[in-house]
């Protein structure tokens, strides 16, 4: 009796077999090329959603194909397990973050296994486990030793809701990336990573990443925000010629400066206003500005406001008095935190000068004859190019040239010079949170800041703490507050801040190469063997933060001699979202499709097939019930085809003998399918078109005549099972067994296509007489020009067409046509 396709039975069965046999373990075999396939590891929030199912299906099909292609494949998985939700759960349900997190991990791991992904779980990592975070601390010390981790007092982004600081990258349009509350500022002593030291390399090396989407590279480029300009140093006579430097992209407008603006937090401000009438007013403004986020302050919708400090600077070239202001739109941590105001040639300065009635001085004469220089600055700023006027010795210089000549002149005078600024800021890594990796530092009254020696790592997170969501419980931990100084043995306290979780995820791909190493984060040998990640798959939401930080980490570790490469991810695939009927899945819309329900109903193979078939990976995918059902029906169709023909199979691979037309055609189709599937999955990552080619093959097999060659038919069926293995691993394994084959289908060698088989034996060509189409003719394929000419002219059909006429010329185009010119 025919067996029906029963995924609920076969899927768990094979999952267990694979697990017992260790089918998905990484095979280390120096004779094979290596391939590292990695999907971004999930945060253990509680359960996997369809978006996860999509990334992991994509990663799995790639990993499986490479294995069958003869690669040694590393395909690991772990958990990005520190972070705020665990603490929120602790506040809400009283669960300990550790317990909550590990329970989630257990559940989500079961979900992943149910999808049938081929993960080497022997390399599993969880960033919250002491075995892992010991080395996160170890690497923090490396950064410290390299002078790349430092502590400073700074105005930092503060989320009052999460009661923690945020990195600039975590402030989106002035709001907290996590909870959307308005971000304010706080003056705190914090740890930073000196990522700005790497700004230039992080920017330039984007050019060495052709395997990354252009869009992501552009986003990183803009984030780094390189700006070429000049520093100009003014002096302040009333403060004993104290210097104040501004950053400008337009040193050519230096003679047009009519005021200077300092960021409200600029350290000179209190001294400038001391004892002046403006003192109270300015200091009050400064306090107000400290609370506002940079994004709000510089937003185009926000009005520019400022205050005169009552003090003046001296212009470096003219010696003129320049009034010094403070204003909301100047930011402390861009450039030098001070700007020169040139209202005639900058829109923003123009608006500011108009509002506060400051002088407007034109120094660039428009090249455009329709604009009178006398008009500039009356109704708007002139921001285009022109020639310098009112600029001393520089009059008459084209302004583009003056950018350089004025900067060079300043340099000679010791008053500035050309320089580069980046928008990228140093990475603020301290968090006032409990559920994170403790920063391995101690503070001693005698010795100051003392790193915890490596042999004393990890600095463990205490587990018996009370979490109220307001205070960091580490600040009342006995362990942290009363410790001994590693240097002098005296009383000391530990750093109570933990690390930004982005540090945890900046090096996990390295740990996977040597996941159980008890002494080192990873050995150089293992990392050098497996890295770079050959294909990294994840969401576009990580285009800036995670990828930039990981690149930074890799470069630092490269410079420290720990790895040989200096970019972690050779190729990057950013997958689209999973939608439901065109809308984003969300609890509030009630349109969430649960992966568990779908697997329960149709099986994991159907879910995988649908996900991979419904859209190319970078595009959004629309989850439709009819689509899933279609995928399920297709698998049933394949199943019945194999089921009905099991008797034809022998133990050995079928040797096809295509000796009739139907067999020849099928033989060619099989090779075409092999080629298409191999390239679509392995090179183009267009899994959808690979699948449709397989579907066409199945259609052909259904109409294959009974009397046609059987050996070719069996060869086609066998190949079909193998080609489906990376896509739908369970049903393929079951069918492989069903037809009596030995071993696992996943251990088969991927079929190769025969280019010869793709060539048609015969082609149809057109016969033209004097340029007019007169007939068609079937000729052997692959004839040369001369052969074709001969073949056609000798043919009796042709002879009849040219009867009684003389051939003057023959033009033969192989595979297409022959034109005979007669007279
Ligand atoms: C004078 C000037 C004249 C400027 C002119 C522009 C046009 P990008 O391209 O983004 O680097 N600036 C410098 N530091 C600043 C800060 N901390 N906060 C706010 N604005 C700042 O922009 C550089 C320009 O932005 C600088 O060039 C400066 O204004 C301003 F016709 O200087 B400019
Ligand atoms: Zn000490």
Image: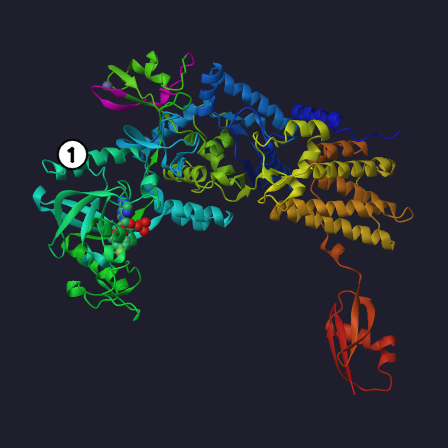
Task: Between residue 765 and residue 431, name the one nearer to us.
Answer: 431
- Label 1 secondary element: helix
Residue depicted at x 47% and y 41%: 543
Q: How is the image coloured?
A: rainbow
| Mark 1 residue crowding within 10 angstroms, few (<14) / some (14–19) / many (20+) | few
Number of numbered discs? 1
Queried whether the magenta region covers residue 460, the answer comes back as: yes
Q: Quadrant of residue 326?
A: top left
- Judge whether residue 108 can be spotted in this image: yes
Q: Is residue 683 left or right of residue 702?
A: left
Identify which residue is drawn at 88% across, 79% down.
Answer: 800
Residue 129 in view: no
**Quadrant including the N terminus:** top right
Compared to 458, does 723 lie above or below?
below
Name the residue: 88% across, 76% down.
796
In percent of width and height, residue 303 lies at 30, 44
Pinpoint residue 603: horizontal percent, then vertical percent: 71, 30
Q: Residue at 71% across / 35% down in the picture? A: 606
* Residue position for label 1: 280
Decide if residue 125 is on the left or right side of residue 499.
right
Label 1 beta carbon within 8 A of ligand 1: no
Front residue of 375 and 419: 375
In what quadrant of the picture does the C terminus appear?
A: bottom right
Q: Position of residue 237 (x, y in %)?
A: 8, 46
Q: Quadrant of residue 613?
A: top right
Residue 771 lies, with reference to residue 112, above or below; the image says: below
Residue 792 to residue 805: above or below: above
The span shown in magenta is 443-464
Front residue of 306/684: it is 306
């Amino acid at each position: 009796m025919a067996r029906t396709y029963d995924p609920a039975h076969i899927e768990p069965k094979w999952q267990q077999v694979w697990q017992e046999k260790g089918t998905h373990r990484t095979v280390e075999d120096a004779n094979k090329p290596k391939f590292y396939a990695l999907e971004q590891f999930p945060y253990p929030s509680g359960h996997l959603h369809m978006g996860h199912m999509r990334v992991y299906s994509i990663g799995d099909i790639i990993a499986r194909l490479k294995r069958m292609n003869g690669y040694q494949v590393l395909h690991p998985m772990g958990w990005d397990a520190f972070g705020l939700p665990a603490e929120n759960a602790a506040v809400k349900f009283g669960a300990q973050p550790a317990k909550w997190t590990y329970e989630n991990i257990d559940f989500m791991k079961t979900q992943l296994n149910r999808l049938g992904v081929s993960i080497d779980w022997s390399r599993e990592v969880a960033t919250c486990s002491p075995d892992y975070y010991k080395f996160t601390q170890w690497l923090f010390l490396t950064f410290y030793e390299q002078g790349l981790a430092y502590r400073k007092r700074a105005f930092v982004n503060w989320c009052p809701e999460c009661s923690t600081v945020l990195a600039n990258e975590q402030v989106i349009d002035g709001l907290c990336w996590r909870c959307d509350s308005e971000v304010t500022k706080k003056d705190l002593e914090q740890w930073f990573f000196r990522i700005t030291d790497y700004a230039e390399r992080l920017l330039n090396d984007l050019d060495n990443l052709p395997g990354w989407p252009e869009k992501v590279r552009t986003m990183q480029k803009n984030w780094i925000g390189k700006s070429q300009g000049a520093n100009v140093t003014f002096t302040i006579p009333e403060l004993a010629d104290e210097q104040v430097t501004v950053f400008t992209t337009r040193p050519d407008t230096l003679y047009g400066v009519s005021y200077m603006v300092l960021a409200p937090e600029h350290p000179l401000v209190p001294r400038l206003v001391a004892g002046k009438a403006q003192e109270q007013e300015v200091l009050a403004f400064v306090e107000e500005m400290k609370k506002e986020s940079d994004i709000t302050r510089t937003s185009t919708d926000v009005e520019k406001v400022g205050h005169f400090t009552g003090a003046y600077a001296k212009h470096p070239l003219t010696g003129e008095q320049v009034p010094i202001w403070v204003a909301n739109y100047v930011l402390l941590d861009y450039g030098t935190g001070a700007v020169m105001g040139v209202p005639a040639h900058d829109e923003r300065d123009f608006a500011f000068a108009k509002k506060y009635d400051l002088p407007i001085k034109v120094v660039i004469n428009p090249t455009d004859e329709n604009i009178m220089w006398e008009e500039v600055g009356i109704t708007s700023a002139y921001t285009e190019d022109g020639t310098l006027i009112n600029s001393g010795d520089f009059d008459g210089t084209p302004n583009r040239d003056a950018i350089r000549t004025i900067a060079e002149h300043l340099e000679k005078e010791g008053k500035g010079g050309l320089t580069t600024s980046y928008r990228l800021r140093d990475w603020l890594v301290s968090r006032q949170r409990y559920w994170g990796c403790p920063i391995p530092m101690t503070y001693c009254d005698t010795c100051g800041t003392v790193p915890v020696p490596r042999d004393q790592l990890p600095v463990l997170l205490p587990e018996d703490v009370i979490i109220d969501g307001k205070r960091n419980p580490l600040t009342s931990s006995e362990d942290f507050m009363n410790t001994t100084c590693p240097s002098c043995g005296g009383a000391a306290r530990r750093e109570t801040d933990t690390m930004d979780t982005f540090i945890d995820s900046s090096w996990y791909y390295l740990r996977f190469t040597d996941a159980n190493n008890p002494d080192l984060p990873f050995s150089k040998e293992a990392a050098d063997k497996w890295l770079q990640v050959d294909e990294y798959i994840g969401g576009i939401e990580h285009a800036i933060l995670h990828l930039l930080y990981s690149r930074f980490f890799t470069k630092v570790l490269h410079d420290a001699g720990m790895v040989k490469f200096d970019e972690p991810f050779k190729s990057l695939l950013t997958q689209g979202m999973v939608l439901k009927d065109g809308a984003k899945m969300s609890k509030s819309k009630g349109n969430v499709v649960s992966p568990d329900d779908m697997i329960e109903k149709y099986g994991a193979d159907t879910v995988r097939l649908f996900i991979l078939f419904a859209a190319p990976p970078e595009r959004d995918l629309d989850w439709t019930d009819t689509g899933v059902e279609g995928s399920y029906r297709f698998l049933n169709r394949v199943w019945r085809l194999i089921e009905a023909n099991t008797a034809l199979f022998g133990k050995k691979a079928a040797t096809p003998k295509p000796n009739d037309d139907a067999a020849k055609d099928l033989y060619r189709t099989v090779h075409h399918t092999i080629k298409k599937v191999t390239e679509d999955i392995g090179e183009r990552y267009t899994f959808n078109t690979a699948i449709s080619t397989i579907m066409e093959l199945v259609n052909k097999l259904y109409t294959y005549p009974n009397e046609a060659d059987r050996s070719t038919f069996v060869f086609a069926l066998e190949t079909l099972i193998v080609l489906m293995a990376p896509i739908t691993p369970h049903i393929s394994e079951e069918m492989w067994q069903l037809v009596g084959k030995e071993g696992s289908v996943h251990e088969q060698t991927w079929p190769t296509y025969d280019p010869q088989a793709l060539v048609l034996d015969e082609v149809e060509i057109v016969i033209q007489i004097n340029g007019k189409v007169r007939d068609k003719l079937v000729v052997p394929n692959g004839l040369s020009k001369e052969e074709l000419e001969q073949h056609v002219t000798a043919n009796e059909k042709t002879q009849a067409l040219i009867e009684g006429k003389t051939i003057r010329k023959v033009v033969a185009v192989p595979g297409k046509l022959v034109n005979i010119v007669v007279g």
